Image (cartoon, rainbow, N blue to C red):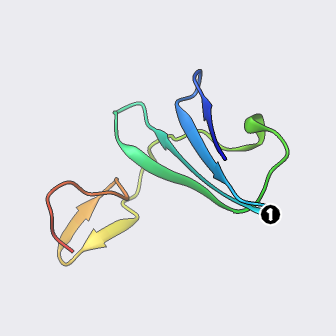
Amino acid sequence: MIKHDDARNIWVLEGDNISYALGLSELGTINHIYFGDKLPRMTDYPNANIISEYPYTVGSELSEEEYMGWGKA
């Protein structure tokens, strides 16, 4: 099942016991926000805020986005 929180712009993909959540940050980037056990309420999932460090790297390039749009991998 796919759920959407309009107020926070997050989407949650749920299986029987597991969920994956992603959301639209304040800058308009799509960010991974949760993967793990299925949570009981939509409000239990974190917001899709940009963090200060750069968690994703491709070679020497850094990005705040998990899904980079410049086609390198």
Q: Secondary structure at mark 1?
A: loop
Residue at 19% x, 78% y is 59
Q: Is residue 60 above or below residue 52?
A: below
Q: Is residue 9 left or right of residue 5?
A: left
Which of the 4 quarters of the picture holds residue 55? bottom left
- The residue positioned farthest toward the bottom in the image shown: 59
- Mark 1: few/some/many CA within 10 Å (<14, 14-19, 20+): few
Give the labeled residue for mark 1.
17
Q: Is residue 35 left or right of residue 60?
A: right
The number of numbered badges drawn on the structure is 1
Residue 12: x and y in percent read: 62, 46
Residue 20: x and y in percent read: 61, 57
Q: Is residue 45 left or right of residue 25?
A: right
Q: Depth check: 59 or 32 in front?
A: 32
Residue at 43% x, 36% y is 25
Which of the 4 quarters of the picture holds residue 53? bottom left
Which quarter of the rendered picture does the C terminus lie within?
bottom left
Dot 1 amino acid type: Asn
Q: Depth check: 14 or 54 in front?
A: 14
- The residue positioned farthest toward the top in the image shown: 7
Residue at 33% x, 57% y is 67
- The residue positioned farthest toward the right in the image shown: 40
Residue 45: x and y in percent read: 70, 44
Residue 52: x and y in percent read: 42, 50
